Image (cartoon, rainbow, N blue to C red):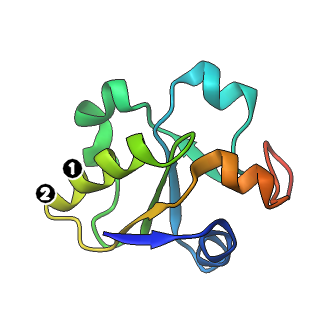
Amino acid sequence: MNELNPKDAQARLQQGALLIDVREPNEYDEVHATGAQLMPLSDFQNSYASLPRDAEIIMICRSGARSERAGQFLIDQGYGNVSNLTGGTMAWVQDGLPTGDDK
């Protein structure tokens, strides 16, 4: 699985990639990367099929561990273009990238 730093992930988002946040709703509500779609890991196996197989998908969580597991699950299900955001939301915030509904 590819690993992306926050700035590279943001550039890919601007080119049409999907950013999937696998944290729980309370974590997402606290802070999330702009453009991230919530798909909690606790329900991921029931909801992943709604993700387009032909899109670039970037996984994000708090620090990168849960998103790596979810990304590997997608790869195991036949998704081909899946990356993990190294350092997760913590790294995104630390890099000063937009959060919440910022543009």
Residue in view at x 79 percent, y 47 percent: 99
Q: Residues within 10 Å of mark 1 (few under 14, many from 20)?
A: some
Residue nearer the viewer, 68 or 38 = 68
Side (left or right) of 20 relative to 87: left
Q: Position of residue 82 (x, y in %)?
A: 35, 67
Q: Position of residue 55 (x, y in %)?
A: 39, 71
Circle on res. 76: 2
Three-letter amino acid code at the position of disc 1: Phe
Q: CB under 8 Å between callouts 2 and 1?
A: yes
Residue in view at x 21 percent, y 50 percent: 73
Q: Position of residue 62 (x, y in %)?
A: 57, 39
Residue nearer the viewer, 14 or 89 = 89
Residue in view at x 57 percent, y 23 percent: 25
Circle on res. 82: none
Looking at the rendered structure, the secondary structure element under dot 1 is: helix
Three-letter amino acid code at the position of disc 2: Asp
Circle on res. 73: 1
Decide if residue 34 is in sight here: no
Looking at the rendered structure, the secondary structure element under dot 2 is: helix
Instruction: Measure how far apart labels 2 and 1 are at the Cα level.
Output: 5 Å
Q: Residues within 10 Å of mark 2 (few under 14, many from 20)?
A: few
Q: Position of residue 57 (x, y in %)?
A: 42, 64
